[in-house]
């Protein structure tokens, strides 16, 4: 067998320690990898950025769904990406403090049960390789500086997020909270708001559009393609439901590191 030595890794090249010769050598400075922790207040128009909705004839629907939330990406010291949404609670008539406590607990339970520990976000730095993070969602209760107002009503016919207001009631369950919470970070409904069967297309982190999701006005929860975003009580969560976080984390890391970082949900 012929002797074959393994080439030195770039950073092991002695020239890399020489300030003059260094410029002539391909020196990878390991210290430049995952050098800091980052966070960013996200304020975006989710329609088009995260998804698009098409009529049966292929015409693009015109919608506007502005969203705000925060992403914490401690890529140096942490092992998870945290998605924070700030809520200010407004108690409506005939609602007690105890009802508010229950409502907060139900939103937190919905987030923990349906959204946490579902996604692994993989960040790929061309100079440093890949690093994986769990995605954790969190509701933060505040008196000011909120992203959304959560109005807790005595009764409410159909809970939902309208603009920056989340209307819920004393009896809103954790599944409904989980579905509505997803809207606060821009995850869309996978049903149509018209009588037509429309098509929802998510935008992937690489910028291309995913294949379409059939979005009739109503989809039975036992339908093969039903998800938590299409049908009441369905608990199916798919990777596309985390692409919004990959898109924002990718943009944040690319801006901070000054080179194209790719993020994806695994
Ligand atoms: Zn919805």
Image (cartoon, helix red, strand yellow):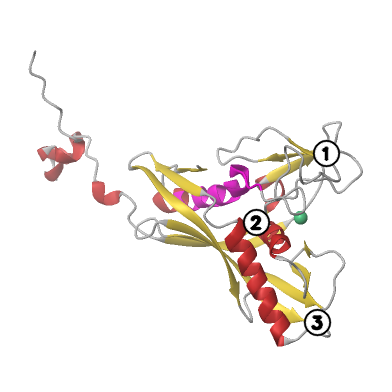
Q: Residue at x 40, y 50 (%)?
A: 257
Disc 2 crowd rating (10 Å Cα; few below 14, some 14-19, many 20+) is some
Task: Measuring from the top left, give residue 146's x and y in whole percent.
Answer: 64, 73
Mark 1 vs 2: CB contact within 8 A: no
Residue 44 numbered mark, or none: 2
Label 2: which secondary element = strand
Q: What is the C-alpha distance between the residues marked 2 and 3?
A: 29 Å
Would residue 87 be visible to someone looking at this image? no
Locate residue 252 relative to residue 149 in the image: left or right: left
Residue placed most toward the observer, 65 or 151: 151
Give the residues drawn in magenta, as a range: 236-253
Task: Measuring from the top left, give residue 70's x and y in whole percent.
Answer: 56, 63
Q: What is the C-alpha distance between the residues marked 1 and 3?
A: 36 Å
Label 1: which secondary element = strand
Q: Mark 3 points at which residue?
A: 92
Q: Residue at x 61, y 68 (%)?
A: 108
The residue furthest top is 1
């Amino acid at each position: 067998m012929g002797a074959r030595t393994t080439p030195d890794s770039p950073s092991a090249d002695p020239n890399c320690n020489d300030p003059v010769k260094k410029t002539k050598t391909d020196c990878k400075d390991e210290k430049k990898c995952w050098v800091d922790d980052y966070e960013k207040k996200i304020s975006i128009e989710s329609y088009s950025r995260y998804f698009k909705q098409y009529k049966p004839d292929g015409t693009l629907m015109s919608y506007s769904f502005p969203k705000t939330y925060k992403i914490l990406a401690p890529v140096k010291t942490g092992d998870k990406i945290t998605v924070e949404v700030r809520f200010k609670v407004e108690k409506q008539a005939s609602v007690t403090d105890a009802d508010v406590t229950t409502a907060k607990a139900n939103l937190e339970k919905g987030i923990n049960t349906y959204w946490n520990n579902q996604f692994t976000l993989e960040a790929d730095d061309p100079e440093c390789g890949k690093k994986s993070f769990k995605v954790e969602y969190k509701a933060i209760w505040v008196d000011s500086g909120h992203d959304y107002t959560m109005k807790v009503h005595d009764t409410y016919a159909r809970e939902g997020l309208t603009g920056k207001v989340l209307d819920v009631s004393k009896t809103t369950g954790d599944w409904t909270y989980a579905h509505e919470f997803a809207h606060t970070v821009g995850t869309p409904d996978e049903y149509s708001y018209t009588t037509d069967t429309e098509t929802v297309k998510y935008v992937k982190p690489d910028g291309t559009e995913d294949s379409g999701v059939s979005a009739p006005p109503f989809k039975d929860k036992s339908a093969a393609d039903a998800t938590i975003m299409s049908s009441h009580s369905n608990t199916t969560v798919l990777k596309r439901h985390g692409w919004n976080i990959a898109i924002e984390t990718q943009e944040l890391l690319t801006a901070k590191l000054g080179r194209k970082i790719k993020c994806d949900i695994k």
